[in-house]
Amino acid sequence: MNIDNYIDEKLAALDQALSTNKRIKTMFPDKRAQDKAIAYIDVETQDEIYLRMQTGEKITRGVLTMCGCTVGIPGFVFLTWVTSFSLFEVAILFFLVILPLCWEIFSPMPYPVIFNRRTQEVYAYFKGELYHTRWDRARAIAYEDYMVNQYTGKTNVGYLEILLQGYNDPDKWIWANLSMPLGRTIEMQSSLWEYLRSYMNNGPWFDEHGNSSASDRYNRQQLEAYHETTRQRLKAKRANIRPDDSTSKLAYYVYLIWSPMEFLKEWVYAMALRRSVRTWPKEVQERLKPNGPTTSLTELQQAKQT
Protein backbone atom coordinates (compact mmCIF):
# COMPACT_ATOMS: atom_id res chain seq x y z
CA MET A 1 0.00 0.00 0.00
CA ASN A 2 1.29 3.49 -0.88
CA ILE A 3 1.37 5.54 2.32
CA ASP A 4 1.36 8.89 0.51
CA ASN A 5 -1.82 7.90 -1.36
CA TYR A 6 -3.39 6.86 1.93
CA ILE A 7 -2.49 10.24 3.39
CA ASP A 8 -4.07 11.98 0.40
CA GLU A 9 -7.27 9.99 0.89
CA LYS A 10 -7.36 10.93 4.59
CA LEU A 11 -6.83 14.61 3.81
CA ALA A 12 -9.51 14.56 1.12
CA ALA A 13 -11.98 12.96 3.52
CA LEU A 14 -11.14 15.53 6.18
CA ASP A 15 -11.48 18.34 3.67
CA GLN A 16 -15.01 17.19 2.88
CA ALA A 17 -15.95 16.67 6.54
CA LEU A 18 -14.62 20.01 7.77
CA SER A 19 -15.65 23.42 6.53
CA THR A 20 -13.28 25.48 4.42
CA ASN A 21 -12.19 27.69 7.32
CA LYS A 22 -10.60 24.74 9.18
CA ARG A 23 -6.92 23.97 8.75
CA ILE A 24 -5.12 20.70 7.97
CA LYS A 25 -1.37 20.07 8.01
CA THR A 26 0.71 17.02 7.07
CA MET A 27 3.80 16.16 9.16
CA PHE A 28 6.93 14.34 7.98
CA PRO A 29 10.02 12.97 9.78
CA ASP A 30 12.45 14.95 7.61
CA LYS A 31 10.66 18.33 7.53
CA ARG A 32 10.58 20.91 10.27
CA ALA A 33 7.02 21.45 11.49
CA GLN A 34 7.58 24.39 13.84
CA ASP A 35 10.41 26.56 15.09
CA LYS A 36 10.18 25.42 18.71
CA ALA A 37 9.98 21.87 20.06
CA ILE A 38 7.58 21.67 23.03
CA ALA A 39 6.56 18.50 24.88
CA TYR A 40 3.45 19.90 26.61
CA ILE A 41 1.69 17.41 28.89
CA ASP A 42 1.63 14.73 26.19
CA VAL A 43 5.18 13.37 26.60
CA GLU A 44 5.36 11.36 29.80
CA THR A 45 8.96 10.20 29.83
CA GLN A 46 12.00 9.80 27.60
CA ASP A 47 15.50 8.39 27.76
CA GLU A 48 18.25 7.33 25.37
CA ILE A 49 16.17 4.43 24.04
CA TYR A 50 12.52 5.39 23.87
CA LEU A 51 9.94 8.13 24.44
CA ARG A 52 6.50 7.30 25.83
CA MET A 53 3.42 9.43 25.28
CA GLN A 54 0.93 10.06 28.07
CA THR A 55 -2.65 8.80 28.24
CA GLY A 56 -5.63 10.19 30.13
CA GLU A 57 -4.97 7.68 32.92
CA LYS A 58 -2.38 10.07 34.33
CA ILE A 59 -5.28 12.32 35.38
CA THR A 60 -7.88 9.75 36.43
CA ARG A 61 -5.95 6.74 37.75
CA GLY A 62 -5.94 6.82 41.54
CA VAL A 63 -8.90 9.18 41.94
CA LEU A 64 -11.26 6.37 42.93
CA THR A 65 -8.84 5.20 45.62
CA MET A 66 -8.46 8.76 46.88
CA CYS A 67 -12.24 9.16 47.18
CA GLY A 68 -12.56 5.78 48.91
CA CYS A 69 -9.85 6.64 51.43
CA THR A 70 -11.36 10.06 52.07
CA VAL A 71 -14.68 8.46 53.07
CA GLY A 72 -13.69 4.96 54.17
CA ILE A 73 -10.80 5.59 56.55
CA PRO A 74 -12.51 8.33 58.62
CA GLY A 75 -15.70 6.23 58.64
CA PHE A 76 -13.78 3.16 59.81
CA VAL A 77 -12.03 5.12 62.59
CA PHE A 78 -15.23 6.84 63.74
CA LEU A 79 -17.35 3.67 63.86
CA THR A 80 -14.60 1.74 65.59
CA TRP A 81 -14.34 4.50 68.18
CA VAL A 82 -18.09 4.86 68.95
CA THR A 83 -19.00 1.17 68.69
CA SER A 84 -17.29 -2.13 69.27
CA PHE A 85 -15.17 -3.48 66.43
CA SER A 86 -17.20 -5.67 64.06
CA LEU A 87 -17.29 -7.06 60.53
CA PHE A 88 -19.24 -4.01 59.41
CA GLU A 89 -16.19 -1.78 59.90
CA VAL A 90 -14.03 -4.32 58.07
CA ALA A 91 -16.53 -4.34 55.19
CA ILE A 92 -16.38 -0.53 54.98
CA LEU A 93 -12.58 -0.63 54.82
CA PHE A 94 -12.63 -3.41 52.20
CA PHE A 95 -15.26 -1.97 49.83
CA LEU A 96 -14.21 1.69 50.08
CA VAL A 97 -10.42 1.34 50.28
CA ILE A 98 -8.97 -2.09 49.49
CA LEU A 99 -11.25 -2.96 46.57
CA PRO A 100 -10.79 0.36 44.69
CA LEU A 101 -7.04 0.20 45.32
CA CYS A 102 -6.73 -3.32 43.85
CA TRP A 103 -8.99 -2.47 40.93
CA GLU A 104 -6.99 0.62 39.97
CA ILE A 105 -3.65 -1.16 40.24
CA PHE A 106 -4.61 -4.33 38.36
CA SER A 107 -7.23 -3.14 35.85
CA PRO A 108 -5.90 -2.69 32.28
CA MET A 109 -4.57 0.71 31.24
CA PRO A 110 -4.72 2.24 27.75
CA TYR A 111 -1.46 1.67 25.90
CA PRO A 112 0.51 4.82 25.00
CA VAL A 113 2.21 5.40 21.67
CA ILE A 114 5.94 4.70 22.02
CA PHE A 115 8.77 6.14 19.90
CA ASN A 116 11.79 3.82 19.90
CA ARG A 117 14.86 5.82 18.97
CA ARG A 118 17.23 2.85 18.88
CA THR A 119 15.23 0.83 16.35
CA GLN A 120 13.79 3.99 14.71
CA GLU A 121 10.14 2.97 14.82
CA VAL A 122 6.84 3.81 16.49
CA TYR A 123 4.57 1.36 18.40
CA ALA A 124 0.95 1.33 19.50
CA TYR A 125 -1.17 -1.46 20.97
CA PHE A 126 -4.91 -1.15 20.39
CA LYS A 127 -7.67 -3.66 21.15
CA GLY A 128 -5.22 -6.53 21.45
CA GLU A 129 -3.40 -5.76 18.18
CA LEU A 130 0.10 -4.38 17.72
CA TYR A 131 0.69 -1.55 15.25
CA HIS A 132 3.95 0.04 14.16
CA THR A 133 5.75 2.01 11.49
CA ARG A 134 9.33 2.73 10.53
CA TRP A 135 10.23 6.27 11.52
CA ASP A 136 11.51 7.24 8.07
CA ARG A 137 8.11 6.24 6.64
CA ALA A 138 6.05 7.88 9.40
CA ARG A 139 3.25 10.22 8.33
CA ALA A 140 1.19 12.35 10.68
CA ILE A 141 -1.57 14.91 10.24
CA ALA A 142 -2.78 17.79 12.37
CA TYR A 143 -6.20 19.28 11.84
CA GLU A 144 -8.30 21.76 13.72
CA ASP A 145 -11.95 21.99 14.65
CA TYR A 146 -13.92 23.64 17.43
CA MET A 147 -16.75 22.86 19.80
CA VAL A 148 -19.32 25.24 21.27
CA ASN A 149 -21.38 24.90 24.43
CA GLN A 150 -23.16 27.19 26.86
CA TYR A 151 -20.48 26.87 29.54
CA THR A 152 -17.19 27.49 27.75
CA GLY A 153 -18.30 29.05 24.49
CA LYS A 154 -16.09 28.28 21.52
CA THR A 155 -13.17 25.94 22.27
CA ASN A 156 -10.49 24.90 19.79
CA VAL A 157 -9.94 21.18 19.24
CA GLY A 158 -6.70 20.31 17.48
CA TYR A 159 -5.88 16.69 16.61
CA LEU A 160 -2.48 15.12 15.92
CA GLU A 161 -2.57 11.60 14.50
CA ILE A 162 0.06 9.22 13.15
CA LEU A 163 -0.53 6.42 10.62
CA LEU A 164 0.46 2.95 11.86
CA GLN A 165 0.45 -0.50 10.22
CA GLY A 166 -0.75 -3.74 11.77
CA TYR A 167 2.12 -6.03 12.78
CA ASN A 168 0.28 -9.32 12.31
CA ASP A 169 -1.99 -7.87 9.61
CA PRO A 170 0.08 -5.60 7.31
CA ASP A 171 -3.01 -4.65 5.29
CA LYS A 172 -4.60 -3.07 8.38
CA TRP A 173 -3.87 0.56 9.20
CA ILE A 174 -4.99 2.93 11.97
CA TRP A 175 -4.61 6.59 12.80
CA ALA A 176 -3.35 6.76 16.39
CA ASN A 177 -3.97 9.93 18.37
CA LEU A 178 -0.79 11.39 19.87
CA SER A 179 -2.09 14.12 22.13
CA MET A 180 -4.93 15.72 24.02
CA PRO A 181 -7.00 17.62 21.42
CA LEU A 182 -9.04 19.93 23.68
CA GLY A 183 -7.83 23.51 23.62
CA ARG A 184 -5.12 22.77 21.04
CA THR A 185 -4.30 24.55 17.80
CA ILE A 186 -2.36 23.33 14.77
CA GLU A 187 0.59 25.46 15.93
CA MET A 188 0.64 23.68 19.30
CA GLN A 189 0.38 20.25 17.69
CA SER A 190 3.14 21.22 15.26
CA SER A 191 5.39 22.12 18.21
CA LEU A 192 4.65 18.72 19.75
CA TRP A 193 5.47 16.93 16.48
CA GLU A 194 8.70 18.94 16.27
CA TYR A 195 9.58 17.67 19.75
CA LEU A 196 8.99 14.06 18.66
CA ARG A 197 10.84 14.62 15.39
CA SER A 198 13.80 16.16 17.21
CA TYR A 199 13.93 13.25 19.62
CA MET A 200 14.00 10.65 16.86
CA ASN A 201 16.36 12.55 14.53
CA ASN A 202 18.62 14.59 16.82
CA GLY A 203 18.03 13.14 20.30
CA PRO A 204 17.92 11.84 22.83
CA TRP A 205 18.68 15.36 24.10
CA PHE A 206 18.17 18.61 22.22
CA ASP A 207 17.46 22.32 22.74
CA GLU A 208 14.23 24.27 22.26
CA HIS A 209 14.82 24.51 18.51
CA GLY A 210 15.40 20.77 18.15
CA ASN A 211 19.17 20.98 17.69
CA SER A 212 21.17 18.11 19.18
CA SER A 213 22.61 18.79 22.64
CA ALA A 214 24.95 16.94 24.97
CA SER A 215 22.88 18.12 27.93
CA ASP A 216 19.39 16.94 28.86
CA ARG A 217 18.61 20.26 30.60
CA TYR A 218 15.94 21.46 28.16
CA ASN A 219 14.22 18.06 28.01
CA ARG A 220 14.13 17.75 31.80
CA GLN A 221 12.77 21.27 32.08
CA GLN A 222 9.98 20.39 29.66
CA LEU A 223 8.98 17.20 31.47
CA GLU A 224 9.15 18.82 34.92
CA ALA A 225 7.16 21.86 33.79
CA TYR A 226 4.25 19.76 32.57
CA HIS A 227 4.49 16.92 35.13
CA GLU A 228 4.74 18.66 38.49
CA THR A 229 4.80 16.21 41.40
CA THR A 230 3.14 16.60 44.78
CA ARG A 231 6.53 17.16 46.37
CA GLN A 232 7.28 19.98 43.92
CA ARG A 233 3.87 21.59 44.50
CA LEU A 234 4.39 21.47 48.26
CA LYS A 235 7.81 23.05 47.88
CA ALA A 236 6.40 25.80 45.64
CA LYS A 237 3.52 26.58 48.02
CA ARG A 238 5.92 26.76 50.93
CA ALA A 239 8.19 29.11 49.01
CA ASN A 240 5.17 31.33 48.24
CA ILE A 241 4.30 31.88 51.91
CA ARG A 242 4.51 35.59 52.75
CA PRO A 243 4.43 36.99 56.31
CA ASP A 244 1.88 39.64 55.34
CA ASP A 245 -0.45 37.20 53.55
CA SER A 246 -2.31 34.72 55.73
CA THR A 247 -4.03 33.23 52.66
CA SER A 248 -0.73 31.89 51.28
CA LYS A 249 0.01 30.23 54.62
CA LEU A 250 -3.49 28.73 54.74
CA ALA A 251 -3.15 27.41 51.19
CA TYR A 252 0.10 25.69 52.11
CA TYR A 253 -1.27 23.98 55.24
CA VAL A 254 -4.48 22.91 53.50
CA TYR A 255 -2.46 21.32 50.71
CA LEU A 256 -0.06 19.80 53.27
CA ILE A 257 -3.01 18.07 54.98
CA TRP A 258 -4.34 16.86 51.62
CA SER A 259 -0.93 15.84 50.22
CA PRO A 260 -1.06 12.20 51.50
CA MET A 261 -3.99 11.64 49.14
CA GLU A 262 -1.98 13.12 46.27
CA PHE A 263 1.01 10.93 47.15
CA LEU A 264 -1.34 7.93 47.17
CA LYS A 265 -2.68 8.84 43.73
CA GLU A 266 0.85 9.12 42.34
CA TRP A 267 1.79 5.75 43.85
CA VAL A 268 -1.31 4.02 42.44
CA TYR A 269 -0.57 5.38 38.97
CA ALA A 270 3.10 4.35 39.19
CA MET A 271 2.17 0.80 40.22
CA ALA A 272 -0.49 0.49 37.50
CA LEU A 273 1.93 1.86 34.89
CA ARG A 274 4.71 -0.52 35.93
CA ARG A 275 2.31 -3.43 35.62
CA SER A 276 0.96 -2.29 32.24
CA VAL A 277 4.48 -2.12 30.77
CA ARG A 278 4.79 -5.87 31.36
CA THR A 279 1.64 -6.54 29.31
CA TRP A 280 3.05 -5.21 26.03
CA PRO A 281 3.79 -7.87 23.38
CA LYS A 282 7.18 -9.47 24.01
CA GLU A 283 8.56 -8.12 20.72
CA VAL A 284 8.10 -4.58 22.04
CA GLN A 285 9.22 -5.33 25.62
CA GLU A 286 12.51 -6.75 24.34
CA ARG A 287 13.19 -3.65 22.24
CA LEU A 288 12.64 -1.28 25.15
CA LYS A 289 15.30 -2.90 27.32
CA PRO A 290 18.73 -1.22 27.60
CA ASN A 291 20.43 -4.27 26.06
CA GLY A 292 17.54 -5.18 23.76
CA PRO A 293 17.78 -6.11 20.06
CA THR A 294 18.33 -3.43 17.45
CA THR A 295 16.25 -5.16 14.76
CA SER A 296 12.95 -3.42 14.04
CA LEU A 297 9.48 -4.94 13.91
CA THR A 298 9.48 -4.16 10.20
CA GLU A 299 12.46 -6.49 9.75
CA LEU A 300 10.68 -9.19 11.78
CA GLN A 301 7.57 -8.66 9.69
CA GLN A 302 9.54 -9.01 6.47
CA ALA A 303 11.22 -12.17 7.80
CA LYS A 304 7.78 -13.65 8.48
CA GLN A 305 6.65 -12.99 4.93
CA THR A 306 9.67 -14.64 3.31
Image: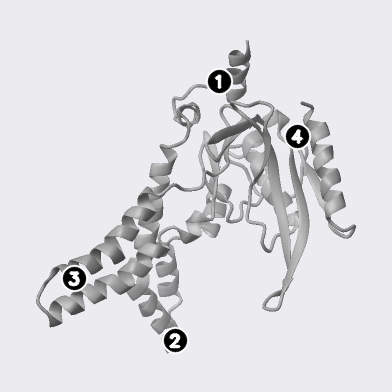
Residue 88 falls left or right of residue 57: left
Q: Which residue is drawn at 83% across and 32% down?
A: 5
In the figure, 87 relative to 103: above or below? below
Q: Quarter of the image holding residue 103?
A: bottom left
- Residue 247's disc is 2
Mark-to-mark CA distance, 1 and 4: 22 Å
The mark that comes first in sequence, 3 or 2, is: 3
Tell me the CA gap for discs 3 and 2. Answer: 41 Å
Can the viewer see residue 34 in this picture? no
Q: Residue 88 carries which label?
A: 3
Q: Which mark is residue 40?
A: none
Q: Name the residue under label 1.
A: 295
CA separation in Å, label 3 and label 4: 64 Å
Marked residue nearer the N-terminal end (3 or 4): 4
**Between discs 2 and 1, the one toward the N terminus:** 2
Q: Which mark is nearer the camera, 2 or 1?
A: 1
Disc nearer the start of the sequence (2/4): 4
Helix, strand or loop for disc 1? loop
Name, please, the residue furthest toward the left: 84
Relative to residue 223, is residue 106 drawn left or right?
A: left
Question: Given this view, does label 1 or label 4 mark the residue nearer the observer?
Answer: 1
| Secondary structure category for the residue under label 2 | helix
Tell me the residue that label 4 is attached to: 30
